[in-house]
């Protein structure tokens, strides 16, 4: 899976704006017309993306992440942000207009694109068909963010 992290997010991680294991972090399932997979400059809020292309299937809703952890791994000289639970989009009507390309992970501020803050876009290795009624991003692939050296 490919990830894109907006440059603003990198600054927010360094200045402490984001507290990834205590902030309200959510995931948005996005379809194949998204520009989240290419845009990283000047993206401060979700509304700064040209096109998010959120799932439009009946029954769709963004989901809150659970079990967020920050782990320091001295053996491999890295720190990891991950979830201990799968990210699950359930109850989809199987009637989306396009296939699903990935998930947009963001800090929920107030539920508006003008204020919610992107953290990263994670692209699926292959798109998931629009007829899906359940999409699971397994915890084995939700080692969401990793910082390493040497």
Image: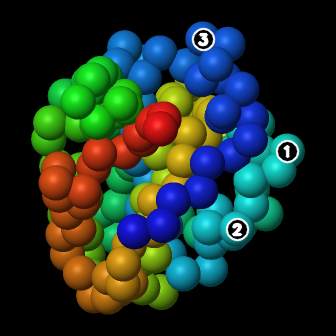
Please tell me how crowded label 2 is: few (under 14), some (14-19), or many (20+) other residues with Cα within 10 Å.
Answer: few
Give coordinates of residue 14: x percent, y percent: 64, 19
In the image, 122: left or right of 35? left
Q: Is residue 81 visible?
A: no
- Label 3 sits on residue: 16
- Near mark 3 (Cα within 10 A), the count class, few <14, some 14-19 or many ≥20, is few
How many marks the image carries: the answer is 3
Q: Disc 1 designates what residue? A: 42
Residue 33 appears left or right of 140:
right
Is 30 placed above or below 22 here?
below
> Which residue lies at the image location 59% right of the left edge and 56% below the top edge?
4
For the residue labelled by badge 2, is the local secondary structure a helix, a strand or a loop?
Answer: loop
Which residue is labeled 2 in the image? 38
In terms of image quadrants, where is residue 110?
A: top right
Q: Against 78, is 16 above or below?
A: above
Residue depicted at 54% across the width and 47% down the height = 120
From the top left corner, tell me how far across and down residue 5 is, in percent: 61, 48
The residue under the point 15% across, 36% down is 84
């Amino acid at each position: 899976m490919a990830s894109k992290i907006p440059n603003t997010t990198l600054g927010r991680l360094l200045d402490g704006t984001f507290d990834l294991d205590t902030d309200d972090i959510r995931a948005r399932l996005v379809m194949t017309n998204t520009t989240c997979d290419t845009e990283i400059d000047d993206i401060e809020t979700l509304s700064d993306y040209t096109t998010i292309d959120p799932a439009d299937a009946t029954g769709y809703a963004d989901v809150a992440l659970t079990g967020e952890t920050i782990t320091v791994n001295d053996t491999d000289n890295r720190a990891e942000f991950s979830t201990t639970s799968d990210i699950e989009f359930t109850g989809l009507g199987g009637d989306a207009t396009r296939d699903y390309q990935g998930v947009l992970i963001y800090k929920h501020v107030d539920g508006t694109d003008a204020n919610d803050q992107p953290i990263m876009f994670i692209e699926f290795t292959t798109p998931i068909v629009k007829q899906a009624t359940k999409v699971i991003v397994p915890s084995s692939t939700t080692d969401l963010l990793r910082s390493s050296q040497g």
